[in-house]
Image (cartoon, rainbow, N blue to C red):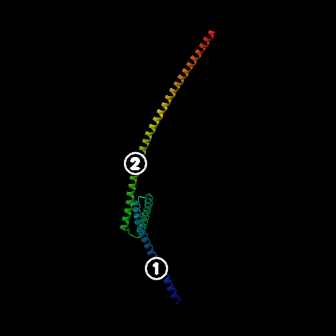
């Protein structure tokens, strides 16, 4: 009887082990499927979030949604490869979401590049125009300053000439007055 109980226990143990191994294999396959479907769902959600961010025209939201979409694409491709390697078959609807999300990112990248080039060109034109205006204003102000300097030099020269003439006139008048005074004094002394 002990042999029968021991044999039945051994048989139960082997059956339990085989059953557990079978469940583990099934669970693993289910986990790959679930992982693949979760990644596809996350990709669809990221695609929707990116579209909403684009509509908001908020650069911070767009950049965050773009990164989320790129990460979701990478995770989806990794999960799909694992799923397919373990006997699963990629679903067309999920592949369409991946293709659509890649096209969306590529189009927005081209638009951003074109917009960036356009913005750079517009900014460059504005800067050039501003520089030209500043240069013209500087040239005008420089001409005014040069004219003022020339006027000042002319005025100083004229003032110097006027002072020189006034000094010469004063010297002549003084000399004439001294000579007259001397003559008057001489005449006065001669009369005596």
Between the residue at mark 1 and the residue at mark 2, the CA separation in whole angstroms equals 72 Å
**Which label belongs to residue 122?**
2
Indicate the position of residue 162 as horizontal and vertical percent values: 52, 24
Q: Residues within 10 Å of mark 1 (few under 14, many from 20)?
A: few
Identify which residue, 28 or 135, lies in the foreground: 135
What residue is drawn where x is 62% and y is 9%? 191
The relative height of residue 125 versus residue 191 in the rendered view (above or below) is below
Q: Residue reaching furthest bottom?
A: 1
Image point (43%, 71%), residue name: 34
Query: Considering only vertical position in the picture, is 146 above or below 6?
Result: above
Which quadrant, please, contains the C terminus? top right
Q: Nearer the viewer, residue 180 or 27?
A: 180
Q: Residue furthest front?
A: 192
Question: Is label 1 in a helix, a strand or a loop?
Answer: helix
Label placed on residue 19? 1
The image shows residue 182 at horizontal and vertical percentages of 60, 14
Q: Where is residue 60 shown, x and y percent of the image?
A: 45, 58
Q: Position of residue 95 (x, y in %)?
A: 37, 65
Q: Earlier in the sequence, mark 1 or mark 2?
A: 1
**Residue 36 falls in which quadrant of the image?**
bottom left
Taking depth in this image into account, of 131 and 61 the one nearest to the observer is: 131
State the residue at coordinates (40%, 50%): 119
Query: Is residue 121 placed above or below 106 in the rendered structure?
Result: above
Q: Nearer the viewer, residue 90 or 42?
A: 42
What numbered label is drawn on residue 62? none
């Amino acid at each position: 009887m002990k042999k029968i109980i021991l044999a039945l226990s051994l048989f139960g143990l082997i059956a339990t082990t085989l059953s557990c191994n079978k469940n583990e294999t099934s669970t693993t396959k289910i986990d790959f499927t679930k992982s693949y479907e979760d990644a596809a769902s996350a990709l669809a959600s990221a695609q929707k979030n990116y579209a909403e961010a684009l509509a908001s025209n908020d650069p911070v939201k767009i950049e965050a949604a773009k990164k989320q979409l790129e990460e979701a694409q990478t995770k989806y491709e990794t999960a799909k490869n694992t799923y397919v390697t373990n006997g699963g078959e990629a679903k067309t609807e999920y592949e369409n979401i991946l293709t659509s999300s890649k096209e969306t990112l590529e189009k927005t990248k081209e638009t951003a590049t074109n917009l960036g080039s356009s913005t750079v060109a517009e900014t460059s034109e504005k800067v050039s125009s501003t520089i030209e205006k500043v240069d013209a204003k500087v040239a005008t102000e420089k001409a005014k300053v040069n004219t003022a300097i020339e006027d000042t030099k002319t005025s100083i020269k004229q003032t110097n000439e006027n002072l020189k003439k006034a000094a010469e006139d004063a010297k002549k008048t003084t000399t004439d007055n001294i000579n007259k005074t001397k003559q008057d004094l001489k005449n006065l002394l001669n009369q005596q």
